[in-house]
Image (cartoon, rainbow, N blue to C red):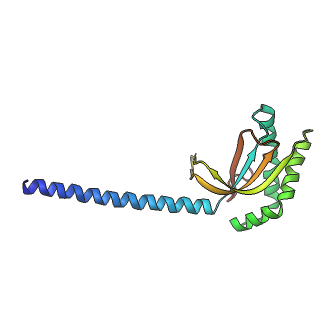
Amino acid sequence: MTSYTRRVLELGVGLGLALTLVLTALADWHQRTAARVRADTIRLHILANSDTWDDQLLKLQVRDAVLAYLDAACPAESKSDALCWAARHLFELQLTARHALAGLNIRAPVRVQLVNMYFDTRRYASGILPAGRYDALRIQIGAGTGRNWWCVLYPGLCRSA
């Protein structure tokens, strides 16, 4: 092996190691950033009774009523404030959803709860919400077997949507 070949080989190995270190650092940064996003986010998750057109429209009516209530009543300025507020107002949130349905002459059970659940990665033009487990305010209409609607409740990305 010539001296030149040996130096080229050493340079290649060195560049390969450097690239490995950079990629490892980037992966670690990404994982830490994703964990911070999940830790500081509350999702709003609304499940329709079924996938029928009518049930999907009812889900959107409930969404609009709940978001209007949250805009008017939830003063939270941190995730912990938002979780505490939601925990204290689960019944009022349930009444808001039921009232939206009753206004359309629909009597369906509504279940409102705080949960920790898995969400897939969601990409937007302005950024990405990484996959993982998030705290969520979950509203289930009827059987809750229909398509869902969700957004970021805190920080208030879906408020006034």
What residue appears at the point 79 percent right and 56 percent down from the top-left corner? 70
What residue appears at the point 71 percent right and 67 percent down from the top-left corner? 80
Q: Is residue 9 visible?
A: yes
Q: Quadrant of residue 75?
A: bottom right
Q: Position of residue 99 (x, y in %)?
A: 90, 47
Q: Position of residue 74 (x, y in %)?
A: 79, 62
Q: How many marks?
A: 0
What residue appears at the point 77 percent right and 41 percent down from the top-left corner? 48
Q: Is residue 78 visible?
A: no
Q: Is residue 127 left or right of residue 59?
A: left
Please name whichever residue, 5 or 67, is drawn nearer the observer in this view of the structure: 5
Q: Is residue 143 left or right of residue 131?
A: right
Q: Is residue 143 left or right of residue 78?
A: right
Q: Position of residue 93 (x, y in %)?
A: 83, 55
Q: Position of residue 26 (x, y in %)?
A: 42, 59
Residue found at the very far top of the displayed protein: 53
Please name whichever residue, 74 or 116, is drawn nearer the observer in this view of the structure: 116
